Image (tube, rainbow, N blue to C red):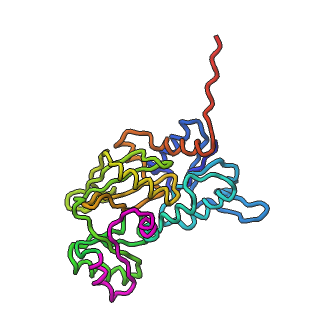
Amino acid sequence: MKIGLLASNPELPSNQRILEAGEERGHRIRFYDIRQCYIKLDAEQPEIHYRGGQLLNKLDAVIPRIRPDLTYYGCAVVRQFENLGIFSLNSANAISHSRDKLFCLQHFLTQGIPIPTTGLADSPLETEELIEMVNGAPLLVKLLEGPERRGVVLAESRNAGESLITAFRSLQANLLVQEFIKEADGKSLRLLVVDNKVVCAVERQAAPGQFRSNKTIGGAISATRISAEERKLAIKAVKSLDLKVAGVDMLRSRRGPLLIEVTSSPALDDLESVVGKDLAGNLISTVEKKLGWKRKLASPVST
């Protein structure tokens, strides 16, 4: 098959692993910088071009890994591929919806998926009541337009919360406040869901003095066992957004697992190094399954 990896950084380890996995399975897989793709909207001859005039209409499938600040343009390009009948591992609509943090939280509640208590208000006059809605301090202040696992600040006191909310609003930033799950003790779960199956689960432990873990601020990551309820919630959340591949973040609380976020372009390399599985290969296998591709058997050697 001819597969296009749509992203913006060919050197990113996760992107490298996907390219390797595709080649190992005998496919012609190429990296295409989403910013260098351009489209022709035409009733008779719609097209997708790549830097230098290369025509991409003959691809069999694309694997989009679009960074948050390129969501609008990236989804436009992915949608064009879909309109041409080219399979996309995650659809443009699914990616777009998953990037809208507020939409996701509201959507999860309609699906019966538990989340931390969250508040949203536009008027600065409602700041005190907004903080009270999420059970007071400590609390989290989250930017709605922030990239995955960034733009999140812990306010340890009510005064700190009020100051943060005021400061962000002065910058015309859209934000929400969320209850702080103290009993999680700086730990969170990341589950990777591929084709409606949880293919790996890890636990992230925040570094000393931090309330969460990520690559920027450090912390530990280790393979972990999950409950049937956690597995069910992750699959339900991803399926409800119509994503074929997604990372699901959740916390363990006294009232059970709480879903935090679903990302349509999850990192793979750090997960693979921890769980020792070919996760990139799972993505390629899903493309093969959706397109009904079967690997050719080697011809028998005559004697």
How many numbered discs sit on the rendered protein? 0
Is 274 left, or right, of 183 in this rendering? right
Q: Residue at x 44, y 58 (%)?
A: 237
Residue 29 located within the stretch drawn in magenta: no
Up-down relation of residue 120 to residue 148 (above or below): below
Would residue 54 be seen by someone viewing this image from the given angle? Answer: no
Residue 166 drawn at (x, y percent)? 32, 83
Q: Quadrant of residue 140?
A: bottom left
Image check: 68 left or right of 74?
left
| Residue lying at the far top of the rendered structure | 303
Residue 69: horizontal and vertical position, in percent? 49, 66
Q: Is residue 128 magenta?
A: yes
Residue 297 position in % (x across, y down): 61, 27
* Coordinates of residue 213 in the picture (x, y in percent): 29, 57
Query: Who is closer to the viewer here, 74 or 125?
Result: 125
Q: Residue furthest bottom?
A: 125
- Residue under the image location 30 percent in, 53 percent down: 204
User: What's the residue at 20%, 76% (across, down)?
Assistant: 157
Where 74 falls versus 278 (above or below)? below
State which quarter of the image contains the N terminus: top right
Furthest-right residue in view? 44
Q: Which residues are magenta?
A: 105-133
Front residue (pair 45, 53): 45
- Describe residue 156's horizontal placement relative to residue 18 as left or right: left
Residue 152 shows in the view: yes
Q: Quadrant of the C terminus?
A: top right
* Residue occupying image coordinates x 45% and y 56%: 236
